[in-house]
Amino acid sequence: MPKVFIAKPVGFCFGVERAIRLAKEGLAKWRRVYTYGELVHNPLVVKELRNLGIKELRNLRDLAAVDDGALVIRAHGCPPNVLLECERLNIRVIDATCPYVQRVQNVAQKLTEEGYQVVVVGERNHPEVKAILAASGKNAEVYPPKRKNRNKKIGIVAQTTIDRNCFRESVANLISLGYNEIRVFDTVCAEAVARQKATMALVKRVDGVIVVGGRNSANTKRLAEIVFRSGKPVVHIVAGEELDVEEWRQFNKVGIVGGASTPAQAVAEIARLLKNFQLPPAEGRKSGEEPLAWRASGGFLQTLSLRPGTIEF
Ligand code: SF4
């Protein structure tokens, strides 16, 4: 059996936990709840919400279906025109935009009002970036900007889950272009950075790393890239059923990292598979009691400490 190391923090970040809680509270109160796109980028979470009866809407046209209940704005936020349309259609809105994501939109809006061209360092097609661009006027661009007018003044912001080193490199490149004026706002989220640092530390201690999280989760992809760049074996999976357990049991030391929208249980399940823990039968457990895998380390997966670290067992 390999020794298993789990990077901390583990489990939902503050913004994801808040979005799920708001959606569930909305369901209890309004009985019919919709989300604008996937609430968070994790199929396990999305499936759980669907099973509870929470429906996803895909675009503005779908808003007409909300004739009752409430619409939840996902953790990544939404373009301002979605909120305007909700107002026009008199739709009740539960805004679960992560406050850190909202802050980027607010900064970008302010920069636009003050005459700066906004440049977003991030993934062009990610909903968070699309929403920032939509809030920043028609001159806003994703890095690298196509229009490099040096007489302009630009304001640089980051997608919350971007690799901080990548953000710094992008800023350095833009500075070297000699713009008239540049304002820089490092809006990378502390949660994302904590997980990136924990992954960098973990990768030095192990023979390979299993990254757990949605394939469309930006912050999870950054963690997989960090391991990939180290040259060590890495696999990015959503859940334990995708893992080649026998292959990973060949290693002496295996690291596991989870994204900000990855349930702690999904991480625990990987550890359980590698260590060959037997879960006690459901009927042998008291109601609400955690399975053996995460009781084994004293309930470690409940720990949502922001301080990066490693859990060994
Ligand atoms: S990773 Fe950061 S910005 Fe994204 S939802 Fe979590 S706390 Fe918010």
Image: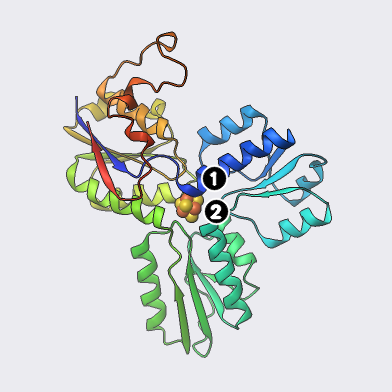
Which callout, 2 or 1, points at the residue further toward the start of the chain? Answer: 1
Q: Quadrant of residue 28?
A: top right
Residue type at mark 2 is: Cys
Residue 287 drawn at (x, y percent): 47, 17
Residue 32 in view here: no
Q: Which residue lies at the image location 57% right of the left edge and 36% below the top edge?
A: 46
Which label number is shown at residue 30? none
The quarter in which the N terminus is drawn is: top left
Say above or below: 313 vs 148.
above
Badge 2: residue crowd in 10 Å (few <14, some 14–19, many ≥20): some
The count of marks equals 2
Residue type at mark 1 is: Arg
Using residue 23 as the reference point, say whether residue 40 is left or right of it: left
Q: Quadrant of residue 298?
A: top left
Q: Which residue lies at the image location 57% right of the left edge and 30% below the top edge?
A: 48
Front in this rendered view, residue 144 or 37: 37
Q: SS class of the residue under badge 1?
A: helix
Using residue 83 as the reference point, say whether residue 40 is left or right of it: left
Front in this rendered view, residue 163 or 90: 90
Q: Quadrant of residue 263?
A: top left
Tell me the distance, in whole angstroms, between the alpha carbons under discs 2 and 1: 8 Å
Residue 63 drawn at (x, y percent): 77, 47
Disc 1 target residue: 18
Badge 1: residue crowd in 10 Å (few <14, some 14–19, many ≥20): some
The quarter in which the C terminus is drawn is: top left
Q: How is the image coloured?
A: rainbow
State if disc 1 and disc 2 touch (CB < 8 Å).
Answer: yes
Disc 2 target residue: 98
- Mark 2: C-beta under 8 Å from nearest atom of ligand 1: yes
Q: Which residue lies at the image location 77% right of the left edge and 53% below the top edge?
A: 86
